[in-house]
Image (tube, helix red, strand yellow):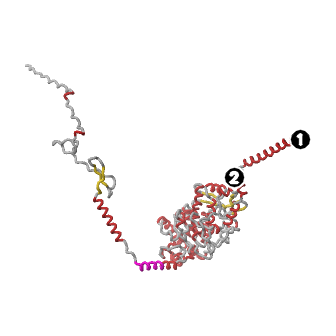
Amino acid sequence: MVRILSFTPPPPPPPPPSFRSIPRPPPPPSFRSIPPRRHFFKKKSKSLPPPPPPLPPARPFGPILPWRYSVKRKRNNRLQPSTIQKDMLTWYLLTLMMRQKLHNRNKQPEETRGEWVISIRDKMEQALREDATTSWDKLCIYRVPQYLQENNKKSYFPQTVSLGPFHHGNKHLLPMDRHKWRAVNMVMARTKHDIEMYIDAMKELEDRARACYEGPIDLSSNKFCEMLVLDGCFVLELFRGADEGFSELGYDRNDPVFAMRGSMHSIQRDMVMLENQLPLFVLNRLLEIQLGQRHQTGLVAQLAVRFFDPLMPTDELLTKTDNSLENDKFFNPIADKDKGELHCLDVFRRNLLRPCSKPEPRLSRRRWSWKTRVADKRQQQLIHCVTELREAGIKFRRRKTDRFWDIRFENGYLEIPKLLIHDGTKSLFSNLIAFEQCHIDSSNDITSYIIFMDNLIDSPEDVSYLHYCGIIEHWLGNDYEVADLFNRLCQEVAFDPQNSYLSQLSNKVDRNYSRKWNVLKAILKHKYFNNPWAYFSFFAALVLLFLTLFQSFFTAYPYFYPPS
């Protein structure tokens, strides 16, 4: 039996909504319709969640100062300063009160007149005691005056090794102490001596050595003697190694210090600084203990001259009469008045100033007589610069001698020996000048030479011309650095030109400079005859002028004297 199922169709879909049936959103509220003192938001309904809490007010960037003004907005939207915060003001007043209280507590009561007079007398007695224990006549190792080292401290202070008490224990110089102890151990092993022999010898010389140094020395007796033994053995090992060979003394070929390596130049430069010296009699005594009876007087000075030879500001060979220091009758560095307060810097200076066969006389040799005047900074001009002298007709020529200070003026030629300038020249000349400024028994020959060169060199063009003449040779960056070196060396140096060995030479040059005929010749030569073609042109013009005159003469002669 077939069952018939009935099918019911689905209901039709609803018609699409028309645009008119969509409800419009309410219009936005206008600002005029909002009553005053009300927010823009509507009243909260009970079904909605509560709003989030308001954000904290933004704090200003940086610390809050005690006198900060707070700002608030009024009804008329204008910014006005409010009152100062009371807590900040209170904290500021409390701080002032505490500071005043501490100041009054630390303030000591003023001493009475009697106590004041007693303190002055104590200071006077202390000064008398210091003067009684100070031997001024033996002073020879000085501290560089502050006015000299103000602009150039590196030239006066050691950078690698310290010798003596002035820079003993400086932090950047302590690494070299290890090598000093190596030198002491090498000396003890080579001589088979006991260290007590050297310590006892330095104990005997302690008072004499202390008298050589300027000012008080903050080292105990034991520390001072230990310093003399340590530094003295180190210096002697360098002297003997440079003369005999470090390998002969037992050092390795690749030793970092006791070998002719790059660090040796820095050590040599430190050893000629005024504040970095040992008395020469200390070195003589230590060498006498090492060599015994073989020791000769002046041997340390001769070793020092050989050791410091690379620092010499000239490369000229010694003359035939001066090629042996042993046979040099003049050079005896420890023969000056039998004094033993000399040091390596003084030995080096004396070697520089070996006199020539005919030394240039000076106006006065008595530096410290009662007639000596105080040096005048306004009168330190020995000579004019190179450019001005050339314009006056004075010529320059290199003088062949190993004495760089031996300057001559003959027949209009200023003859100057060759001078080598390297990176250690500034430190060398600075310490030599400082020693001459401080030591009363020293002449001013190095200072005179440096001021003379400073007067000659005023510009890089002057340096360039002296280099062209073979007088100056340098390994600095450019000619400007050489000119700046000489112009800065004697900025604060007191100098009397009348007490210079170059005073008579400068007078000769000034007399030649003042002659007008020489000036006229120089102007003609530098402006009109400065090259060979100018001479050819001049002679050609003369020949043409003579030919023109002859032609004019023979043309006019028949007119005035017609032939008969």
Q: Amino acid at mark 1?
A: Pro
Q: Position of residue 550 (x, y in %)?
A: 83, 44
Which of discs 2 and 1 lies nearer the camera? The answer is 1
Q: Position of residue 274 (x, y in %)?
A: 55, 68
* Towards the viewer: 64 or 481: 64
Q: Is residue 366 above or below residue 16?
A: below
Q: Magenta span: helix, strand or loop, mainly?
A: helix
Residue 200 visible in the displayed image = no
Name the residue rendered at 71%, 55% in the picture: 520
Q: Position of residue 499 (x, y in %)?
A: 64, 69
The residue to which callout 1 is attached is 562
Q: Is residue 116 magenta?
A: yes
Residue 206 visible in the displayed image = yes
| Quarter of image, res 3 | top left
The residue to which callout 2 is attached is 526
Magenta range: 112-125
Q: Position of residue 86 (x, y in %)?
A: 28, 59
Q: Is residue 161 magenta?
A: no
Could you classify mark 2 by the number of other residues whose Cα lies within 10 Å: few (under 14), some (14-19), or many (20 or more)? Answer: few
The quadrant of the rendering that contains the C terminus is top right
Residue 264 horizontal side relative to residue 101, left or right: right
Q: For the image shown, how many numbered marks are present on the structure?
A: 2
